[in-house]
Amino acid sequence: MFKVRAKYLLLIACAVWLLAGLNIFRLGLLACLEGQTPWWVLLIGIPAVFIVFHMMFSKLVGKHSRRIDSYGENRTHVLKFFDLKGYLIMIVMMGGGIALRSFHIVPTWFVAFFYTGLGAALSLAGIGFLIHYMKKGAPVRCPVSKHSSAA
């Protein structure tokens, strides 16, 4: 039950990462619109956070895409777009982010630049899964980091 052809796991991963990224980006944008963050913090912080997370996520997209491709044409459980480590990281990141905002541990100016950069990187990772799906196993190279996902 709840099994799909393995190649569709790439589309599921695309949707999950893209929706999560857009939601995080939206939270960052709302914090930016509060006007408490100096423009120079946004100008430096958003690209810096984006680059750091994009470098990490582009490697994860390649790793997960290769793992999913290795399933071949088999039908696989719908939740196997992540491995156990991926789910644990997701739980820690989501729980930490919710706790930081809920308990006001970090100021709004931090949420503004950090969430905007992180959300953009997550969204781009979602698009990366879509590109892997469309390329059907062909090597995909990130134009920013020159990291190849086919190893």
Image: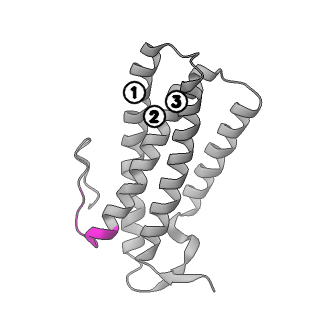
Observer-nearest of 114 and 64: 114
Dominant SS type (magenta): loop
Q: Which residue is mark 3?
A: 114
Looking at the rendered structure, the kind of residue marked 3 is Phe
Q: Nearer the viewer, residue 70 or 26?
A: 26
Q: Which residues are magenta?
A: 133-140
What residue sits 60% from the left and 57% below the top?
87
**Pointer 2 with pointer 1, Cβ within 8 A:** yes
Indicate the amino acid at tag 2.
Answer: Gly
Circle 1 packing at 10 Å, graded few (<14), some (14-19), many (20+), is some
Q: Is 103 drawn above or below residue 151 in the view shown?
A: above
Which tag, 1 or 3, sits closer to the chain's start?
A: 1
Which element type, helix, strand or loop, lies under badge 3? helix
Q: Nearer the viewer, mark 2 or mark 1?
A: 2
Q: In this figure, what is the number of numbered marks?
A: 3
Identity of the residue drawn at 54% across and 25% down: 32
Q: Quadrant of the C terminus?
A: bottom left
Q: Badge 3, how many Cα within 10 Å: few under 14, some, many 20+?
A: many
**Mark 1 vs mark 3, CA separation in Å:** 9 Å
Residue 58 rendering spot, x and y as whole percentages: 36, 49
Look at the picture and state if 117 lies above or below 45.
below
The reply to whether the C-beta atoms of the residues labelled 1 and 3 are less than 8 Å apart is no
At a point 70% along the width and 32% down the height, the residue shown is 101
Residue 81 position in % (x across, y down): 50, 67
Please report contact status of discs 3 and 2: CB closer than 8 Å, yes or no: yes
Q: Which residue lies under the disc numbered 1?
A: 48
